[in-house]
Amino acid sequence: MKYSVVVVDDHNLLSQAIGGLVEGFEEFSVLYTCKNGQELLDKINDTKKIPDIVLMDVNMPILNGIETTQHLHKDFPDIKVLALSIEEDEKTILKMLRAGAKGYLMKDVKKAELEKALLEVMEKGFYHTNTVTKVLVDSLTDTENSHLVLKDREIDFIKYACTEMTYREIAEKMFLSPKTVEGYRDAIFEKLNLRNRTGLVIYAIKNKIFIP
Amino acid sequence: MKYSVVVVDDHNLLSQAIGGLVEGFEEFSVLYTCKNGQELLDKINDTKKIPDIVLMDVNMPILNGIETTQHLHKDFPDIKVLALSIEEDEKTILKMLRAGAKGYLMKDVKKAELEKALLEVMEKGFYHTNTVTKVLVDSLTDTENSHLVLKDREIDFIKYACTEMTYREIAEKMFLSPKTVEGYRDAIFEKLNLRNRTGLVIYAIKNKIFIP
DNA sequence: ATGAAATACAGGGAAATACCCTTTTAGATT
DNA sequence: AATCTAAAAGGGTATTTCCCTGTATTTCAT
């Protein structure tokens, strides 16, 4: 039995092209394609047709690749996500991986590499190009200039955010203005793809920044 | 060496009377007295005179006994709190115990029982009258009419509250109106003495209602 | 020294939250 | 049938949060 693939991309032309490539692979066949993340989640819930692997664009309208991957990772942990993007900046790559993607390819990927990536994700669980691996390594070492790594002061803030204090009160404790504190919050939300303080608290506890 | 006691009560007459009684006990002496919780916390921080045990009134202005006990329990876990109150309703008793009080006495307590309570709290870690014990047992069994125990539906809500969903979104998931969901929230805040959703998330995780 | 960052702070506005208090609905009790 | 009760829903408001944009000041590398 072939592995089933779903292609999610708002660019019709591209998703069809990719679908075509996938159909040509020995071990894969296209289950269906979607124009954005919401469509994918809906289709999974409606038709119960669950793919083995999703080729996911990152920049899409309505529900983008990062959020979609987060949802999938949570509700369908068995579905592998392989990101396929034009973006190759560090931020996006890390966000996508953090969301649970098993690999990250540039959109100008060659046919052979796409096949190899799909296969390795299914069989080894992940596939990473040198670019991505470098980003991963950098994110650990470049503690200073990496955009996605939390700074000391941000960690301080997060600990306060894990209490019942308002931002005004946190600002007093940190000897900063409330607006600055809100700036920290926004920066962290952006880095970690969070919607609100509740998400931050859960993140902090999961990652042992705050131990309740 | 005698155990040091602090009496916290806004009623001057009463706190002096209690202080007098304590001074008469073999194993205890009064370190100081305070008119409310805030005064106690300030005095501890300013003078660093840390009592072994606090005889705490529940109804006080500025900072009441429940909140004061919560603070103490968190920042000075070694200080024992023995609640001393006229209130004997189930709600108040449970809130006080939940906040970390080691015992709960009515204000018409006899001298001998006060001494016994102080001693047992210091040596066994707790002292509970039959009234309080009954409340505790009821809180486990009377799942229906107990005011301070979380109901199934409230537990459901809490799990949702530990996500990034807004109350509106939670309402959809629970097939309720947003207003009803807010009603659950308010009821829970009241029961658990919480200020906001952040506090609820922390509570839920501490008590394994939600496992991140 | 000079432009490029990171940092601290601010304003404004829409959305969400928290805190009131009242009413409706539906079930159970007597 | 009348009554009581709990759950559900609504109304109003102040505060807080979220998100955006913009501006000095400091720090730092070239």
Image (cartoon, coloured by chain):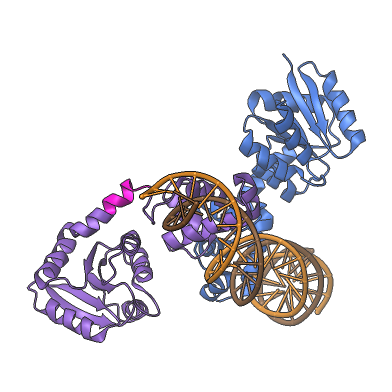
Chain colours: A blue, B purple, C orange, D brown
Depth check: give the residue in front, B85 or B71: B85
Depth check: give the residue in front, B186 or B198: B186
B109 displayed left or right of A194: left
A120 displayed left or right of B129: right
Give coordinates of residue B65: x percent, y percent. Answer: 33, 71
For the image, the number of numbered tags is 0
In the rendered image, is residue B125 in sight? no
Q: Is residue A125 above or below residue A203?
A: above
Query: Residue A195 is drawn in which quadrant?
Result: bottom right
Query: Residue B84 is drawn in which quadrant?
Result: bottom left
Residue drawn at (37%, 78%) of the image: B38
Depth check: give the residue in front, B133 or A81: B133
The stretch of residues the image draws in magenta is B136-143
Residue drawn at (11%, 73%) of the image: B111
Depth check: give the residue in front, A2 or C24: C24
Give coordinates of residue A180: x percent, y percent. Answer: 64, 72
State the residue lying farthest toward the left. Answer: B26
The majority secondary structure of the magenta stretch comes to helix
Residue drawn at (55%, 76%) of the image: A175
Give coordinates of residue B164: x percent, y percent. Answer: 62, 52
Is B179 covered by the magenta stretch? no
The quarter of the image holding the N terminus of chain B is: bottom left
Q: Is residue B75 above or below residue A144?
A: below
Q: Is residue A33 above or below residue B19?
A: above
State the residue lying farthest toward the top. Answer: A1
B127 displayed left or right of D9: left
Residue drawn at (38%, 80%) of the image: B61
Query: Residue A170 is drawn in which quadrant?
Result: bottom right
State the residue lying farthest toward the bottom. Answer: B12
Give coordinates of residue C22: x percent, y percent. Answer: 56, 68
In the rendered image, is residue A62 in sight? yes
